[in-house]
Each structure stands twice: as C-alpha cells, then as structure tokens.
Amino acid sequence: MTTIRPRILSIALLASIVSVGLLSTAQASDQGETAKQVAVLKSDAPYFQKVLACKRLATIGTKEAVPTLAGFLGDAKMSHYARFALEPIPDPSVDAVLRDAAEKLDGLLQIGCINSLGFRKDTGAIELLGSFLKKDNPQLVAAAAAALGQIGTPEATALLKTALASAPADQKAALADSCLACAEELNKAGNKAAAIDLYDTVRTAADLPSRSVIAATRGVILTRGAEGKDLVLAQLQSDQVGLYKVGLETARMIPGDAMTKALLEVLPKLSAEKQAHLLSVLGDRGGNEVLALLIDRAKNGTGNIQIAALTALRTLDDASSVPALFAAATGDSPTIGAAARQTLVALKGKAVDQAILQELGQAKGNARLVAIELAGARRIAAATPELLKATADQRPAFQLAAITALGETCSLDDLPVLAKFSFATGDVVKPAQTAFLTACKRMPKDACCEKLASIMKDASVDEQVFLLNLIGTVGGTKALELAGDAAMSDNDAIQDAATQVLGKWFSPDVAPVLLNIAKNSKSKKYRVRCLRGYIRIFRQLGLPKEQKLAMAGEAMKLAERDEEKNLTLDAMSRIQSPEALAKAVEYLSVPALKAQAATTATTIGEKIAPTAPAAVAEAMQKVLDAKPSQELINKATIILNQTKK
C-alpha cells in the first residue's frame, strides 16, 4: 500500500498538469483569435467584415475585446452586433460597459443595452434599471421592467411591485408581463413564497388586461401545487371564460387525492355544461370514486353529462363499466349509443372482451345486434362460434352484422362460410366479399391461399374469377403459383382474370411466371399481355442493371409485334450502362424501331457520357449515321461534342 499511494498521487498530479496545460492552450488560442478580430474592428475594414468579426467574437471572445466592442455601443449601425458579441463574454467588465452605455445613451440604442443587461441577469444593474421605471418614456419603462423580470431577484421584485402599483394605465400591461417573468425566475431559484406573492400581486392588481390576470392565476396555482386546490375550485366556478379554462387545465395538473376529492365535491354545484367538462377532467385523474361516479352518470346522466361520462370511461379501461356502457349503447338515443359504442371499442384488456362476450351470449333484440358489432370491432376471436350462428339469423341486419364481424374474427377454417355468402345473391354479397377480403388480409399469406385453392376446386368459373382477384390481393408465393397455373387454364375467363392479376403484381418474383406464359400460352392475347407485364417489371421495379438488361433481351426475343419491341426499347432507356447503350444501337437499322432506338440511345448516352465517353461517342456517331429525326440528330450531336471535351 505504501508504494502504490504515491504512484496514484503522481498520476493524479500529472493529469491535473495536463488538464491545466490544455486549458491554457485553449485560452491562448481564443485570445489570439480575439486579437485578430479586434484588429478587424479597429481597422478600416468594410462594414460587413466588422459584422462578421462581431459574430466570431460572440463565440470565442475574451475580456480583451470588451473595450473595443464598447466603443461601438453608440454606433447606430454596429451597436446591435457589438452587444451580440458582448453578451456571451463571461467577464464583469461587460456588465460595467453595458451599464455605462445604458445610462448615457438614449432611444433604441439605450433600450438595446438595457435588453443586454437583462439577458446577462446583471444584478449590479438593478438600481439603474429601477431609476428608469420612473421615467415618462413607456418604451424605456417597458425595457427596464423586462430586464428586471429576467434578473428575477427579490430586489428586482420589490421595484416591479412598486412600479406596478403606481404606473399609469398604458404601462401596466408591460409591467405585469415583467412581474410574471420575474415570478417564474423566483420559482426556478427556489424562492417559492416570493413567486407566489408576486403572482398574487398581479392577479389582484387593478386595471390589468385579462390575459395578465389569467397568466398570474395559472402561475400561482401551479406554484402552490396541492395547496392551490381552493383556487382551482374558485376558477371552475368563475363566469370568466379564461379563468374557467385555467381551472380546468390546472385541475388536471395538480396531483393528489385531495384535489380529486375537492373536484368531486364541487361537481354538483356547477352548471350542466361545466359538469360535463369536469367529468372529462376526472376521467383523466382516475381513481375508484371517479370510476363509480362515471358509471353512475353513464347510467343516469342526461345529455352532455351522460356523453361526457361515457367518453371519460374510455381512459379508465375498467371492465366493470361494460354493463353501463352496453346499456347506453343499446338505448334509444343514437348520439348516446354512438358515444357508448366508441368507448366500448376503445377499452383495452381481455376482461373487457370477456364482458362483451357475456353480453353477446345473453343479449336479445337490438342489444344482440350491438354485441355482434362490438365483437367484430374489437376482433374478439372467441366470439366466432356465436357469430357463425348469427349468420343464419333471418333478420337481414343481424345476418349482415355477423358476416361483417366474422371478417375481423374468423380463422382459416371459417373462410368457406364467408365464401358461401360471397357466392350468394342479393344484398348479402358485397358485405360478404368485403368481409372475405378483410379476413384474408389478416391471415398468413400462403396458408390463406392454400385454403382459397381448396375452395376453388368446387367453385364455378365466376367464383374462381372472384377468388383469383382475392388471391392477387393477398399475394405471396402460393398466390403467385395459383395465379400462374390459372393463367394456363383452358378457360378464357379464368385466363383473363389470372393474367390481369399477374399484370398488376408488384414484386419481381412474378417475372419468371409472366415469361413462362408469354412463351407458352396458346392465346396470343395473353402472351402479349404477360410480355407487357414482364416489360413493366424491369421498367418500374428496382432490379440490378445486369438483370434488367437480361430481361430486356428476353423480351426482344419474344416480342412478335413492333409495339412490344418499342416498349422494350423505351424501358431500356432507364438502364444507364454502356451495355444497354450498345444493345439499343443494334436496332437503329430496323426502320420500325429506329426512332425509339435513337431516343433510348441518346437518353442513356446523355447520362453516362461523363463516365464512358468513348462508348457514348461511338454510339452517338451511329445515331447520326442512322439519320433519325432532326431533334434526335441535334441531341446526339450535343452529346458527341461533350464526349470530345
């Protein structure tokens, strides 16, 4: 131990020396930079260079810059920039020169220096600022008051309180604002009692605008915290809208059971409109007493009070509220029912689902209809057996509600039920098809398509067409396989549907399927459609250049018509490589393709000329030799000249 301790001390000493050395180096650097910028200010440099010097000094300035900057405080053009540079310098000499300037200058230059004293929270300027409060100049008084508010000490507070009490009407608003700022500073500094006193001074002062009184009331309530509950209650009973809103806001913010209890006690004393507002606040606060109250108002309240209670229950997420909510949801009032249903859908937790399942099992009439809708909206999978029963209900509204709900709750094994209604006739078809689609989108893609494939086996042609479109929406590997097989069917309607589905596919894995159909389909119409779909894949999707070029080559081989060949050439214009350029040039000799080949070549050449000038130059010369339109000749000439540069 005796040998280790001196070593530790020596390491600590070395670290201290290094730290001091680094600090000294940084200080020396700042001083050197400061001297450089001061020299600019002292020189005959242009105005904008002096402005830049001030901005630089605001970052690295030291006390050595203060005398020079002080000389610009009386300069109308430079004063602002000088103060900007002085304000961050951590040296008492800055405060001294600002005080001196504030005392000697007048007008906007004086007010600017006063603002800087406030920014620096210069306690040494309090007496000077206090003297300005007695002047007849409203701008000067407002600036001095604002600075005192920023300083925020007890001494500044005393001056502001005195000034507020005796100020003329046109100065009171500015002084009140400064008092509020000062109270905030006092509270930050831990002087809670002084802050409360100053807020109360503003709150009770005469001839102040309502905004000042409102801000002071809010400030004093939040500063008092739990001790401010009586003042909260007073604002809730106020006829002034601004103060009432402060009451509602702070009622949410003041913590503790005492505040909640006080709000419960004042509730019956308020108007119906205010009770509705306060129920929302109580819902945010929570607690067993609040829950009991809200359930009671959800059952027995009327109008806005009942709606507010139903809505507030949403924030409590308690399953015990479900019976009251369900009763309201199944009542005669559409407005009340809608509010209750929205809350029942929003409540969280399995206990709520279980309570709704219980209602579903026992409800009759309209209540059963609501329970069915809620089971679907909440996606309660356990409700599926009851919903399946409800699909046999002879009442159309109940049957449609059950089918719609199944779209949100059913499993793979239940899809044949939705298929049955989707293939039916009448009003049930469209809702059933929508539910069928909703269900399929929720399920694993390949497993869902396996189930759809099994349904297709016994389906009619029209039903298979519907299922193919559904499969295309679901997507996935199995869906692609099914659509590809269907596209090679002997039935024209099925081929038509399948090729349309494949033509809209938005993943590159469809390319081999489309290529196979384009090669092997017995129908020219579907070969052309799939070839166009194949071209779209390498035109629009983000594939490697080499793969795109290979696909373009396959398309050109398969294309039987000039339309598809030109379409392929147009798609090739997006492949920015020398290889694509060379391939496009090959078709300049084909009359029907020359215009598009030249367009593609110049489009690619323009893009890659900086990186492949030789290849581009050769290609542009071939374009010129082919003699396309004058516009393309001009473009090729420009590109060729660029390659020479």
Image (cartoon, helix red, strand yellow):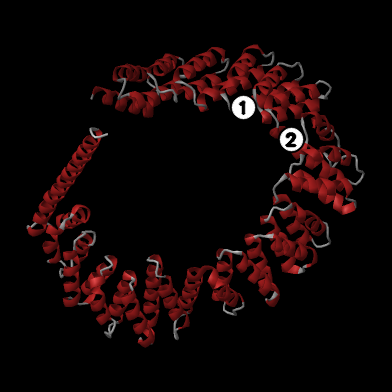
Instruction: Identify the mark nearer the N-term, 1 or 2.
Output: 2
Type of residue at label 2?
Ala
Residue at 79% in and 45% down: 354
**Quadrant of the image containing the N terminus:** top left
Residue count near mark 2 (Cα–Cα under 10 Å), binned few <14, some 14–19, many ≥20: many
Whole-percent x and y of residue 261? 65, 69
Q: Is residue 597 above or below residue 396?
A: above
* Marker disc for residue 505: 1
Q: Is residue 428 above or below residue 582?
A: below
Horizontally, residue 7 falls left or right of residue 284, namely left
Quadrant position of residue 491: top right
Whole-percent x and y of residue 450? 74, 22
Whole-percent x and y of residue 170? 37, 84
Q: Is residue 36 above or below residue 441?
A: below
Quadrant position of residue 642: top left
Q: Is residue 238 visible?
A: yes
Type of residue at label 1?
Trp
Q: Which residue is mark 2?
A: 439
- As helix, strand or loop, the secondary structure at mark 2 comes to helix
Q: CA distance from mark 1 to mark 2?
A: 21 Å
Q: Which of pointers 1 and 2 indicates the residue nearer the eye?
A: 2
- As helix, strand or loop, the secondary structure at mark 1 comes to loop
